[in-house]
Image: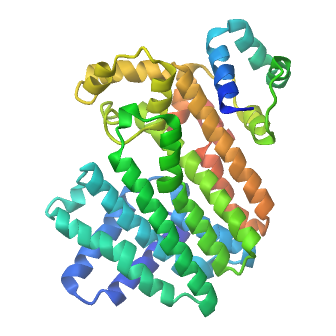
Amino acid sequence: MTEWSRRVFDAAREVVTTEVVDPSLRELVLLGLDSFASRLQSDASYHFIHLPLGIHAAVAKSAAPAIPLAAMLTMIFAGFDIVDDLADGDAPEAWRNYSAAERQLAASALFCMLPQLSMLKLDAAGEVRNAMQRELASSMITIAAGQLDDVRSESLSLSRQALESIIAGKTAEQPALYARLAARLAGATEQRVELAGELGRAIGFAAQIASDLFEVMRAGDARAPWGGSPNYLVTLFLEGDSRLDRGRLEAAATDVEIALQLRSEIGRSAATRLAAFEIELHCQRARRFLDAFGGSTAGRAFIVPMIEQLSVFDSARMRAFQKN
Amino acid sequence: MSRENIEHLIDRWMNDSQFRNDLRNDPEKTIQATGEELSDDEWAALRNVDWSLSDDDLLAHANMGG
């Protein structure tokens, strides 16, 4: 975890410690925050931290004033993470001794109650805070609708267009929100707020497709992507092969050998090449929106690594690969 | 270039060894020869793609991002 990320998580813990007076509820909420922090992987993927800090720095030449905003967004994302786990039936180790109801309460505090208090304390003019509050509420409704489409979908019969609609609403909307809020806080024009949103959306799409590609291909539980939440690579594969036996797909959810065979077939299919190109296309859109957004090099220093880390063809990753 | 055209490009890459070799040697010339029009973003993405990667290498690269 970088120094910036540590400062943001510390700020989020400070909010919880200060605002949640009841010790039992405070313990639950801190557990939610700390459990979330422990499960995060590469620092560059902390979009809810680096994107608002970077956008603010790009506009106002300083990232530090956006730490309270990033802390608020971290709490929201941590709350969504708990809700997502509950919807998927996942139970992280940290929550082993707690009920679903307790996890829901922690999530509610993180994505509903505490952000409202945080918003009131942001160092911004009243009308800016009002605009940010409207942006946040409206966006969270969009995200909730995307989550509803996700939980109601039949993952193995979903079209790519339907899945992209879910990604737009549920996943890509989140970094779009982070970027727009930071732009407003920094005093950007409406045009730049919109550009920030498009930049965030492109990053969100690239991140989701990259995550889905990794989920299918990673060493680990090969049964994981089958029959669970919709997966972009699996959807592309299914669209490309109408002869595929659906019974085999359903069996892959419980049979490791079938799951490994399918993974091998997908890895060598056009779907994987297409997914890698789609990731690159969204990365390129993000680069274009970032150039159009403009601003300080301090801001770009946060955002460029975020984009490049998503590209399958990133030069740093290529060099590391060749070194190994 | 529409999504459908990108899919045709990828399919052709998978099934036509001559097209694959041409694309690896000179991606821009090969795509231009197809007569398809690409957006600026698509051209930029195309230039960033390493067409020389084998299936195994591509998957290894994808796994490094996890």
Which residue is at 64% across, 63% downward? A197
Decide: is A170 above or below A196: above
Q: In this view, does A251 lie to the left or right of A315?
A: left
Residue A219: percent from left, percent from top: 38, 32
Query: Is there any visible trace of residue B66 in the rendered image?
Result: no
Query: Is there any visible trace of residue A295 in the rendered image?
Result: yes
Q: Quadrant of residue A179?
A: bottom right
Decide: is B61 above or below A151: above
Q: Is residue B46 left or right of residue A128?
A: right
Residue A55: percent from left, percent from top: 67, 69
Decide: is A233 above or below A106: above
Q: In this view, does A200 lie to the left or right of A291?
A: left
Q: Quadrant of residue A94?
A: bottom left
Which residue is at 67% across, 8% downward? B16
Which quadrant is the C terminus of chain A positioned in? top right
Q: Tell me the colour scheme of the image.
A: rainbow
Which residue is at 73% across, 76% downward? A188
Residue A129: percent from left, percent from top: 57, 86
Observer-nearest of A309 and B12 = B12
Q: Quadrant of residue A157?
A: top left
Residue B27: percent from left, percent from top: 79, 23
Total labels: the figure holds 0
Which residue is at 62% across, 37% downward? A278
Observer-nearest of A19 and B12 = B12
